[in-house]
Image (cartoon, helix red, strand yellow):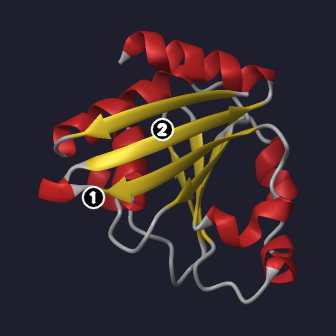
């Protein structure tokens, strides 16, 4: 296990974090995103997707559709578990297919479906700080995620 804390003072810092994640995450990565409403989960996904060539404005929170897919230089599956009633409803969406794909799976409100997530993943907890800053607490679980977090640490 490996951990990294990053404080974004403004949106450009979050953009930099997202762009760097886009570079260091290996194929088939699963990223769990946890934070309160308005913490910046979707904004981080937009930043990552933009760095992979997806138009930022096309990336919206999938709260009502539950899942959106985007094709950039890597495929992105963007999931929002906020409105799911239970883990069975999440499993009905077919997450195993996403987890085994070559793309990136980014799950907002992942704490609601944590027992359904693969063991190897990157957990990102976002906390709102004073003056609109954000603290990103990242926890890598599994060998490839530890390597990705080490690469992220070296690049930020």
- Residue reaching furthest to the front: 130
**Nearer to the camera, 102 or 138:** 138
Q: Quadrant of the N terminus?
A: top right
Is residue 48 shown left or right of residue 146? left
| Occupied quadrant, residue 6 | top left
Instruction: Pick whichever, 88 or 93, lies toward us.
Output: 88
Q: Position of residue 145 (x, y in %)?
A: 69, 27
Residue at 59 percent across and 27 percent down: it is 25
> Which residue position is annotated with label 2?
72
Percent position of residue 91, x then y: 86, 72
Residue 144 percent across, percent down from the top left = 74, 22
The residue at which mark 1 appears reads as 57
153 horizontally vs 100: left or right: left
Give the residue displayed 69% in from the left and 72% down from the top.
Answer: 112
Label 2 close to label 1 by CB (< 8 Å): no
The secondary structure type at the circle numbered 2 is loop
Considering every residue shown, the one lying at the far top of the view is 154
Q: Looking at the image, is mark 2 or mark 1 earlier in the sequence?
A: 1
């Amino acid at each position: 296990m490996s951990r990294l804390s990053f404080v974004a003072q403004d949106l450009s810092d979050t953009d930099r974090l997202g762009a760097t994640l886009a570079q260091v995450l290996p194929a088939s990565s699963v990223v769990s995103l946890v934070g309160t409403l308005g913490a910046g989960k979707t904004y981080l996904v937009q930043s990552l997707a933009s760095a992979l060539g997806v138009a930022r404005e096309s990336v919206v929170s999938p709260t009502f559709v539950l899942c959106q897919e985007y094709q950039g230089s890597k495929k992105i599956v963007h999931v929002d578990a906020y409105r799911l009633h239970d883990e069975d409803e999440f499993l009905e969406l077919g997450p195993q297919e996403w987890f085994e794909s070559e793309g990136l799976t980014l799950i907002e409100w992942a704490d609601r479906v944590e027992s359904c997530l693969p063991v190897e993943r990157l957990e990102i907890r976002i906390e709102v700080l004073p003056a609109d800053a954000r603290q990103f607490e990242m926890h890598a679980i599994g060998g490839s995620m530890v390597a990705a977090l080490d690469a992220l640490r070296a690049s930020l």
